[in-house]
Amino acid sequence: MQQYITNIHKTIPPSLMDVFTKEKRSAIMRAIKSKDTKEEVLLAKALWKRGHRYRKHDKSIFGTPDLSFKKYKIAVFVDGEFFHGKNWETVKSRLDSNKEYWITKIEKNRKRDVEVNEYLTSKGWTVLRFWSNDVKRKCYTTVRTIEKEIENACKKINYLQQDKCR
């Protein structure tokens, strides 16, 4: 039996919940960017202002991190909640249209995220993943987390090379 959402004025079947036509929804989904999202740019600018230099979308690093600090072997990813499956079990049950496609796609994304994390970690990299909404809401905390990892990496480099970092 189909579930219905009851509003004070009327009852709406789940298939009619989207306020956009299929064509409009498709256009909206196509316009979603895979790199240089608002949250990525916000984080990158905040780090740059604090004097940190990084590479954006460096294809020479497995998984093409959004930001990378090669000297410190730190890879930073800013993941969108929907496409990377935040609270996946809850969200999965709420999917309505094109359910099979989205489940397959998002589970593939999640699997790839794990593979990238494992590979980079095995090569001595520190992988930092942040949800885009966390970057937006807690940008300073996110920047401080990255800075702490840079400081830790700097200490390792100093210990190994007996040199000043930066």
Image: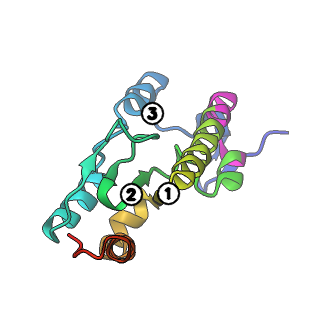
Residue 69 visible, this orientation:
no
Residue 135 % position (x, y):
36, 64
Amino acid on which disc 2 is placed: Lys
What is the number of the mark on residue 124? Answer: 1
Residue 15 visible, this orientation:
yes
Q: Is residue 114 left or right of residue 126?
A: right
Segment colored magenta: 93-104
**Residue that carries the numbered disc 2 in the rendered image:** 73
| Spatial CA span between label 3 and label 1 | 46 Å
Other residues around mark 1 within 10 Å, as few (<14) / some (14–19) / many (≥20): few
In the figure, 58 relative to 136: above or below? above
Q: Earlier in the sequence, mark 1 or mark 2?
A: 2
**Residue that carries the numbered disc 3 in the rendered image:** 20
Could you tell me which secondary element the residue under label 3 belongs to? loop
Q: Is residue 65 left or right of residue 13?
A: left
| Spatial CA span between label 1 and label 2 | 7 Å
Q: Are marks 1 and 2 in contact (CB under 8 Å)?
A: yes
Residue 10 % position (x, y):
62, 47
